């Protein structure tokens, strides 16, 4: 369920009293409204902070706490920068409160300086840096001992394009004719079979960010911070590359971006050729998953504008994928 601005602000203002003493000098400003709502909190004699109001029904207090467990472990154990979590006045990382008869969850983070690399244009250097960061997170995920009670989503077949798709059915994305639907059914079946053959051993499946795009990096000079672990969970490690090129999977620059990402990744962690050969499968998996997401967001202006083009591009990509036997998208 998408969160609405007035609702989000009411929840944020209620939660704010759990973090800071009431003061007329405290300012709350909306900075992003998408699945969740993000506000910047400004207080006199204190650095700014970020307040994230979670949408209804997507995460529980327990799964959010698990997200924060990993985020804080990455911050402590690696060179990857993540936002610090600010505890409430009663020492809670996740503040839960009742709003209109349901429980809602809020988290406060330190404000991190920087802008997304996308603001300066997409280039190979940005993807190389993203590959380096991604490999560092994967290395940490493989070695980290998760705390008891750790709970996160699983992004395997059944919960992506399978019967229990978390974002809905790609068939409901709209703008596809019967021929497109048949072609994409064939592509989806090939994705499923290639994933099953690839397997889910510990060298290829584990805890991932699951939305590790350039939009979720903040760059300030030489400092880079990874944000928005809200979708983090268990999947194939290379699903993170599919996420890295979200909404631009058919850009002609993709081969160069992929080469740069791989170069950055391999500067930190080994990646066997048989893993690299799976990248087209993960790109198409993510693209079809985003088509499902669009189906559940068809009422938004952004989806209405890009939906027909994105659906047509996905069908064309799926046809090339099937023609190549699942080894290419171009």
Image (cartoon, grey):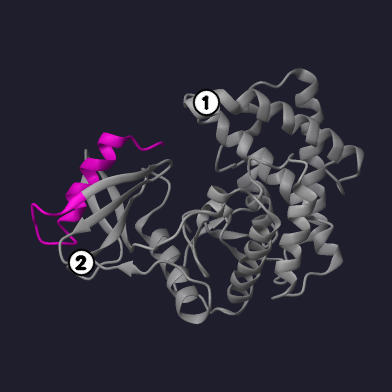
Residue at 33 percent of width and 34 percent of height: 4
Kindly identify which residue carries mark 2.
Answer: 46
Residue at 34 percent of width and 67 percent of height: 85
- Provide the residue span drawn in magenta: 1-27
> Foreground residue, 272 or 64?
272
Residue at 74 percent of width and 18 percent of height: 177
> Foreground residue, 245 or 271?
245
Residue 40, position in %: x, y? 29, 52
> Foreground residue, 261 or 59?
261
Q: Classify mark 2: helix, strand or loop.
A: strand
Residue 115, position in %: x, y? 47, 55
Compared with 84, 61 (above or below) is above
Which residue lies most toward the top here? 177
Residue at 43 percent of width and 40 percent of height: 34
Kindly identify which residue carries mark 1.
Answer: 298
Q: Classify mark 1: helix, strand or loop.
A: loop
Tell me which corner region of the image, top left, top right, bottom left or bottom right, holds residue 94: bottom left
Magenta region includes residue 312? no
């Amino acid at each position: 369920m998408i969160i609405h601005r007035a609702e989000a602000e009411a929840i944020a203002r209620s939660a704010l009293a759990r973090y800071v003493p009431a003061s007329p000098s405290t300012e709350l400003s909306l900075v992003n409204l998408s699945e969740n709502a993000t506000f910047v909190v400004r207080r006199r004699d204190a650095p700014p902070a970020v307040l994230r109001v979670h949408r209804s029904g997507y995460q529980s207090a327990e799964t959010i706490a698990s997200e924060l467990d990993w985020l804080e472990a990455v911050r402590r154990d690696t060179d990857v920068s993540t936002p610090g979590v600010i505890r409430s006045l009663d020492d809670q990382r996740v503040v839960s409160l009742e709003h209109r008869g349901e429980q809602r969850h809020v988290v406060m983070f330190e404000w991190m300086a920087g802008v997304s690399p996308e603001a300066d244009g997409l280039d190979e250097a940005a993807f190389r840096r993203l590959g380096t960061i991604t490999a560092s997170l994967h290395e940490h995920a493989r070695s980290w001992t998760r705390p008891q009670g750790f709970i996160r989503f699983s992004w395997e077949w059944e919960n992506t394009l399978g019967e229990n798709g978390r974002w809905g059915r790609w068939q409901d994305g709209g703008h596809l004719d019967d021929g497109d639907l048949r072609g994409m059914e064939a592509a989806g079946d090939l994705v499923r079979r290639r994933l099953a053959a690839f397997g889910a051993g510990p060298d290829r499946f584990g805890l991932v960010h699951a939305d590790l795009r350039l939009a979720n990096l903040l760059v300030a000079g030489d400092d880079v911070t990874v944000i928005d672990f809200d979708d983090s969970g268990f999947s194939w490690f290379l699903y993170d590359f599919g996420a890295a090129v979200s909404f631009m999977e058919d850009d002609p620059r993709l081969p160069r971006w992929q080469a740069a990402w791989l170069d950055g990744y391999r500067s930190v962690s080994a990646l066997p050729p048989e893993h690299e050969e799976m990248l087209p499968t993960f790109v198409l998996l993510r693209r079809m998953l985003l088509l499902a997401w669009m189906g559940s967001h068809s009422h938004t202006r952004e989806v209405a504008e890009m939906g027909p083009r994105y659906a047509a591009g996905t069908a064309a990509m799926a046809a090339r994928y099937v023609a190549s036997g699942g080894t290419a998208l171009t």
